[in-house]
Image (tube, coloured by chain):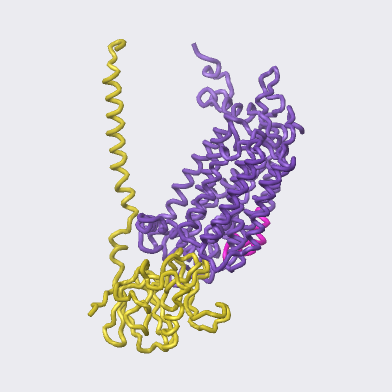
Chain colours: A purple, B yellow
Amino acid sequence: MQNKSNQGGGTVGDWINDRLPYRQFVEDQLTGYYAPKNFNFWYFFGSLALLVLVIQIVTGIFLTMSYKPSADGAFASVEYIMRDVEWGWLIRYMHSTGASMFFLVVYLHMFRGLMYGSYKKPRELLWIFGMLIYVVLMAEAFFGYLLPWGQMSYWGAQVIISLFSVLPGIGEPLAIWIRGDYLISDVTLNRFFALHVVALPLVLIGLIFFHLVALRQTGSNNPDGIEIKENKGPDGKPVDGIPFHPYYTVKDIVGVGVFLALFFAIVFFAPTFLDLFLKPANFIPADPLQTPEYVPPVWYFTPFYAILAAIPDQVGGVIAMGLAILVLFAMPWIDRHPVKSIRYRSFLYKALLMSFAFGFIVLGYLGLKPATTLYNELALRFTEFYFMFFIISWVYSEPRSRNYYYGAFAIVVALIAVIDLVRDMAGISWIALLVMIAVTAFFLLLPAHTRLNESKPVPERLTS
Amino acid sequence: MSNGVDNNRRHFLTVATSVVGGIGVAAMAAPFLASLRPSARARLAGAPVEVDVSKMDEGERITLSWRGRPIHVVRRGEDAIERLGEIRDRLRDPDSDSSDQPEYAKNEYRSLKPEYLVMVAVCTHLGCSPSFHPDPADPAMGSDWPGGYFCACHGSRFDLAGRVYRGVPAPTNMDIPPHRFVDDNTLIVGEDAEVA
C-alpha cells in the first residue's frame, strides 16, 4: 500500500510535505491564523522588532568576522572595520543604529500593550515572555556596548557592574566574578563578547519562540480589546478575524518599507543621531585611569538610570531601579480592570497612562543630563510619579467607595512625605511637594466626587 | 500493584535517578561557574608602585595606576589642611568609621603624613573617577567650596581627604590604599607602613 506521491505521481512539494509537513505549518501559523480585522498603526512594531532582530544577527555575524575581542585589539579593529573593510562602515552603522531602533520599536510595542490592555487575562504569560525578552535585550545591548572598547564602553560598564557590588555581603565578590578581574579588563571584554554573540542571542531567540507560541494560543488583542474568539461564524472562524496571511503580511510590508526608509536615513545621514546612538567619548580608546567628564548611558537605559540617580542613597537607588523594571512584570495583576482597551477606559485612566508615558520620556531626558539640583529634584518627583502610576492603576481596577479613595490619597501623600523627610538633602522643595500632592489629589480625589473615572460601554463587535 | 508493576519501587527509582542526575548537573556546573573567577594571571597583577614626590608643588596632584585603579597623590598646602577641620558638619563620615582605609590613615587627613593624600580615586557610589577641584574659588563648585573632588557621574562631592559630603549618592569616603614612605621623597603604594 503506497500513497500517490511515493509512486512518483506528486509534485516536489508533495514529496517534501510527506516528509516535512510544511503545509500544515503554514496553515496553522499564517493562512489559518485569524487575527482581528482592526489592527492599526500600533500593530506594526511586533513584526518590525523581528525585522530588526534579523538585521542585528546578519550584521553581527559579519562584524564578528573582522572584530578582535581583546583589550589591545578591540578599538583598533573597530576602526579597521570603519576604514579598511569594504562596506564595513555600512555594516557597523547598521548594527549600531539597529540597537537603538530595536529599543525604539520595543518601547512602542510595549506602550501598545499598555494602551490596549494586552497584558490582561488571558495574555499574562505572553506579557511576561515579552518582559523577559526586554530584560535580555537590555543585557544584550549592555554587553555589546563594551565591545568597541571606547571610553563610554569602559566607564558605562564600570558603572553598571558596580551596581551589583552594592548588594550587601555578596556584592563585591559578585562584581569580581562578573568581571573576572578586579577591574574591567581584557578578561571582561572577552567574556562579554562570548555572551553578546553566542549566549544571549540564543536565549533571545528561545524567548521569542515562546512569545509567539503563547500569542498563537490566545490570539492577538486589538484596539477595541474585544475577544474575537468569542464570536465565531458557522465555519468556526472568528467573524471579526481575517487570516494573518495575506492580509497582515501585506500590511506589515508597508510598515517595513517606511521603517527601512527611516532606518537607512539614520545610517547614511546621522549615524550618531545627535550623539544619542553613538557618544563622542566612545571614539576615544578606553582609559582605566581617566573617567570622561560625564558618563550617561545610551538613551534607551536613561529612564531607569535617572531613577537610580534620583535616590540619594546607594542601596535605595539600586533597589528603586530594579523595582522599576520588575513592577512591569506584575502589570497583569496590578491593573485588573475588566475593560481592556484605553478607548473605553475612563478619562482619568487615559490621563494617567499618558502622564506615565510623558514622565518616562522626561526621566529619559533627565538621565542624559549631568546632575544638578533642579534635575535631581525633577528626577525624584518623576520617579515618585512612575511608581504612583502602578498604585493608582491598582486603585482604578474596580469601583471604590469614597472613603477608599480618601484612604488611598492619604497613603500616597504619606509615602511622598516620608521620602521627603528621610532623604538626606539640604532641604525640602515645598513647591515640588505641593505639585506632587496636587497630582495625587487629581487622580485619587476626583474619582470620589466626579464621574471622570467612569468607563464607557464596550461594544459587542469590533468597531472598524 | 497492577500487572506486576511495583509502583513504590518505580517511584523510588524515579526520585533516585532525578536526585543523582541533579547532583551530577550541579557538580558539572561548578567548574564552569568557577572558571569565571579571576584567573591566576589576573590575581598576580598587583605589584606595589614606587613614586617620587620630591618635585610636587603644593596643590599638585599626580595620577598613577595600581592594580589597574587610578591612584591620586595630592600634596596639600597648610591652608588646605586647615580647611579639613572646618567642614566636619557637612560630611557624612568625618571620622571614616564606615570607610575603607588602613588603620594608620584613619585620621582627619586620611593619610600617613598630613601633607600627602594617597587615595584610590574611585567614587564609592558606582566607580567613576571623580575630577579634582582643589581651588576653593572654583566658580563651578559654589561659593563655600573648600576644595576637593566632584564626581560628574552622579554629583557626589568629596573633600581634599576623600571624605564624602552629606546628601550625595556616594555612601562612604573614597578608599585609601596601603602606602608607606621609604624616605622623605619616595612613596610606595601597595605596601603597608609599619606603624610606630
Q: Is residue B141 above or below residue A179?
A: below
Q: Is residue A12 above or below residue A316?
A: above
Give the number of callouts.
Answer: 0
Q: Residue at x 27, y 29 (%)?
A: B16
Residue nearest the observer in this picture, B180 or A350 = A350
Question: For the magenta stretch, what is the residue range?
Answer: A263-279
Q: Position of residue B54 (x, y in %)?
A: 35, 88
The image quadrant where one finds the C terminus of chain A is top right
Residue nearest the observer in this picture, A66 or A52 = A52
The residue lying furthest to the right in this view is A464
Q: Is residue A351 left or right of residue B156?
A: right
Q: Is residue A236 above or below residue B93?
A: above
Q: Quadrant of residue A371?
A: bottom right
Query: Does B162 lie within the magenta span?
Result: no
Q: Quadrant of residue A426?
A: bottom right
Residue nearest the observer in this picture, B32 or A247 = B32
Q: Is residue A34 above or below residue B41?
A: above
The residue lying furthest to the front in this view is A403
Q: Position of residue A313 (x, y in %)?
A: 48, 61
Q: Position of residue B19 (x, y in %)?
A: 29, 33
Q: Is residue A91 visible?
A: no
Q: Is residue A405 left or right of residue A19?
A: right
Q: Is residue A275 visible?
A: yes
Q: Position of residue A357 (x, y in %)?
A: 65, 50
Residue nearest the observer in this picture, A110 or A29 = A110
Q: Is residue A321 left or right of residue A184?
A: right
Query: Does A266 lie within the magenta span?
Result: yes
Q: Residue at x 27, y 74 (%)?
A: B191
